[in-house]
Amino acid sequence: MRLNLFWKLGFAFFALLIAVLLPVDYYAERTLRSDYERAGFDQLSAIARIALATPPPASSLSTTSHTASPALAEWVTRMAASGVRVTVITADGLVLADSQSDPQTMENHAGRPEIRDALAKGDGLSVRHSVTINRDLLYYAARFSAPSAPPVVLRFAMPLGTVDNEVWAFRRRLWLSSLVMLLVTGMVSLVISRSFSSRVERLQSFSRRVAEGDFRPIDADRSGDALEVLAVSLNDTAARLDGAIRTLTEERNLSSAILGSMVEGVAVVNSGERLLFANQGFAEILELDNPPQSGRSLVEVVRQTELLEAVRAVLKGEPRVEAEIVTGTLRQRFFAVTVASVSAMETSGAVIVLHDITDLRKLERVRRDFVANVSHEFKTPLTSFSSIRGASRGSPTISLNSPRWMPIVLTWSWTASASRNLCKAAWRPHNAPPPKKTCAFPPI
């Protein structure tokens, strides 16, 4: 981490330094060369003015021979004492004298740019390579017209190597100072990167602690930069996560305790018919040793076709399906099944609730048996009573108001009324309105 960051900062500083030094070197070299050339031309111009003030003797400027006269050679030597090259050239390009070369071996100079300019305008400048001495030179040429002789050109030159040496000296100083600057900035970047990377590693370690569930805050340094703001933000985020996870954990534990203590069986399946949750009651109802593990297929746990069909109907789009299943063979148990659709974010599934209604079914069977027995026990006496009452209407000897028949009539009437009320109560469930179905007793 530190090494990578150091090299990244180092390369950034190096690239920035190179990006600055290259244009500085380019423009500095051009400026220095231009300044030195201008200074060189000024020096040559000053020497030329001195030479024109003390020109060579007119008698020495003969154009008939390549051999310089002693007077002209002496004048050239005296002018060359200033450190410049001195050349005397005729108007047609013939070299009469030169301070550094034999005029007889030199070619015609009529085509040189400084010579043409001097003959045309009075003076000329040029920077070029000298074929004679094989060096780059600064040339300054001035036209001199003697009273009794044709015009000649006095040319003065100085090596351009002096300018190049000065430019290279400046360039060496520039790059040396840049190298020192690079080393200093490298050391500074190393110190900064180590400090920066150590703080980043502390934040990284803190994020790993938070991922592992340790929400203790990190000590934020008082640097006042972006990393301090980031540390404060991470502390706030960790505190919020801690509170949210604690709340979710409490809610999950509470929900698990509630579902685990329920007598009813509760299970949750996903859209792929795989169990996500099942409480102990669900396992006991289906006669399982332990609650099925999450991820098991529902068909591996449930054998009741009605329950499977209800779950599949809800998963296909039904909001709620109710059914009834029976478990056991010798000792049957009845359960009411309620399957409801449930969805969370992008997932969907179904919630299964199994409610034991075995006792209710037993009570219903007892009630049906009781009603059947009561109807059977009271139907025969009441039918006999109805027959006697019909016979009394057709026979004057039989009177139901006689002391013989009156107790029997009252007893049978009370029995019939009580039986009718008992049957109505037996047919009506608790807190339900009176049913339309009544006991079929003949009227008295």
Image (spheres, grey):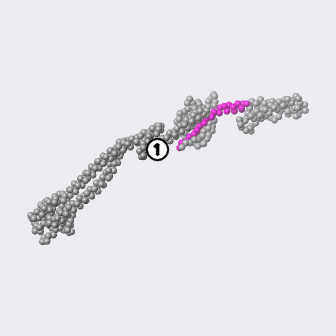
Q: Is residue 338 magenta?
A: no
- Which residue occupies the extreme right position in the image? 396
Foreground pick, 163 / 8:
163
* Image quarter of the C terminus: top right
- Which residue occupies the extreme left position in the image? 70
Query: Residue 54, can we see it?
Result: yes
Look at the numbered disc 1 and give the secondary structure of its residue: helix
Q: Amino acid at mark 1?
A: Ser
Task: Give the side of residue 199 with respect to residue 349, left or right.
Answer: left
Q: How many marks?
A: 1
Task: Tell me residue 101's x, y (percent).
Answer: 13, 60
Dot 1: within a 10 Å radius of its alpha carbon, few (fewer than 14), some, or many (20 or more) residues? few
* Image quarter of the N terminus: top left
- Which residue occupies the extreme front position in the image? 222
- Which residue is at a point 58% across and 35% down the rendered structure image? 258
Task: Give the side of residue 400 with respect to residue 105, left or right.
Answer: right
Foreground pick, 119 / 94:
119
Task: Tell me residue 66's x, y (percent).
Answer: 11, 64
Vertical position of residue 280 compared to residue 85: above or below: above
Vertical position of residue 269 compared to residue 289: above or below: below
- Which residue is at a point 59% across and 37% down the rendered structure image? 352
Task: Tell me residue 100's x, y (percent).
Answer: 14, 59
Task: Give the side of residue 170 with respect to residue 419, left or right.
Answer: left
- Which residue is at a point 30% across and 48% down the rendered structure image? 181
Where does the magenta region start and end?
A: 346-370
Task: Tell me residue 407's x, y (percent).
Answer: 85, 29
- Which residue occupies the extreme bottom position in the image? 148
What residue did someone put label 1 on? 233
Residue 442 position by quadrant = top right
